[in-house]
Image (cartoon, helix red, strand yellow):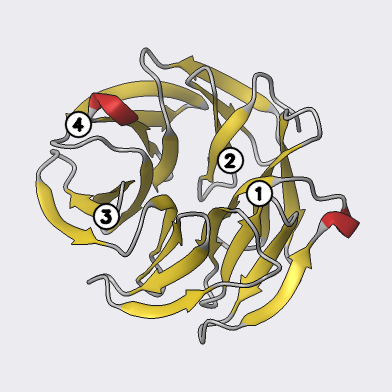
Amino acid sequence: MSPSPAVHAATFLSSGYLVLLDLNSTLLLFTENYTLLHELKLEDKAFDVTALSDHMLAVTIGAAKRVELIDVKDDTLQPNGKIELDTECFHVSCIDDKIVTGNGSLVSFFNVKGARLKTIIMSGMIQSLYISKSHRKMYLNIRSEYVLCADMRGNREYKYKHDDLQEIGGVTADNRSLAYACGSKSNNVHQVGPDGRLVRIILSKENGLTKPISVGFDSTCSKMFLIEKDDTLKEAVKVYSMNY
């Protein structure tokens, strides 16, 4: 699956549908068989997308200090309001009906009306973040150098850094408390245990992997998407079946 123009963010819905966000700030909705159903062009520059529920998306509009809500209804994408925030918002995740954004070294929690609930100062610049709903942990890519796993108060569980994980891109976790981080320079995906140690390298250049920049799971953690760049710097989205 190679959408055009380049894709830089994605999320699965619990239905198995896949939503992509491209560099033209267009959302693309695909079925579980990856047939394109609908496209929605947003007015302003969008940065990231997450699924608040199977019928609602949240899209960050970075410098505009805004999150846009998008309904997924009858196999279409429909705007459903805007949440004005008090800060720029780039990376986004969610938990318990709360929108969680990453900007600079700050992780901020907002309700769906845009009221700030709390802010956590992390140890460095956040390049990507993921909140695990199943075991209530935060996974953050800090400065593209290491993965930080923390509880919901920001207390560190572990810091993962490896010589064979270079220029970290996206981070995520499955429902078994295993974390995943893709190395865009090392051309691989590391699987990390709850103790912060490498379990295995699940994909590498030998598997045809090229410059992975984003990773994520469906709700059952049976499918994993990767956004990769090829040698011409074009992005492609690949979906893998997971075998544990």
Q: Separation of disc 2 and disc 4 at Cα?
A: 24 Å
Q: Earlier in the sequence, mark 3 or mark 1?
A: 3
In the image, taking residue 117 as reference, residue 128 lies left or right, namely right
Q: Which residue is mark 2?
A: 17
Q: Separation of disc 3 and disc 4 at Cα?
A: 17 Å
Q: Answer yes or no: do the residues labelled 3 and 1 have beta carbons within 8 Å? A: no
Q: Earlier in the sequence, mark 2 or mark 3?
A: 2
Q: Residues within 10 Å of mark 4 (few under 14, many from 20)?
A: some
- The x and y percentages for residue 236 are 73, 34
Q: Answer yes or no: do the residues labelled 1 and 2 have beta carbons within 8 Å? A: no
Q: Separation of disc 3 and disc 1 at Cα?
A: 24 Å
Residue at left offset 68%, top offset 48%: 212
Q: Separation of disc 4 and disc 1 at Cα?
A: 28 Å
Q: Quadrant of the N terminus?
A: top right
Q: Residues within 10 Å of mark 3 (few under 14, many from 20)?
A: many
Residue at left offset 21%, top offset 53%: 109
Q: Earlier in the sequence, mark 3 or mark 4?
A: 4
**Amino acid type at mark 4:** Ile
**Amino acid type at mark 1:** Phe
Q: Which residue sits furthest bottom?
A: 195
Q: Which residue is mark 4?
A: 83
- The x and y percentages for residue 100 are 28, 51
Q: Which residue is mark 3?
A: 107
**Displayed quadrant of residue 22:** top right
Residue at left offset 54%, top offset 23%: 23
**Amino acid type at mark 2:** Tyr
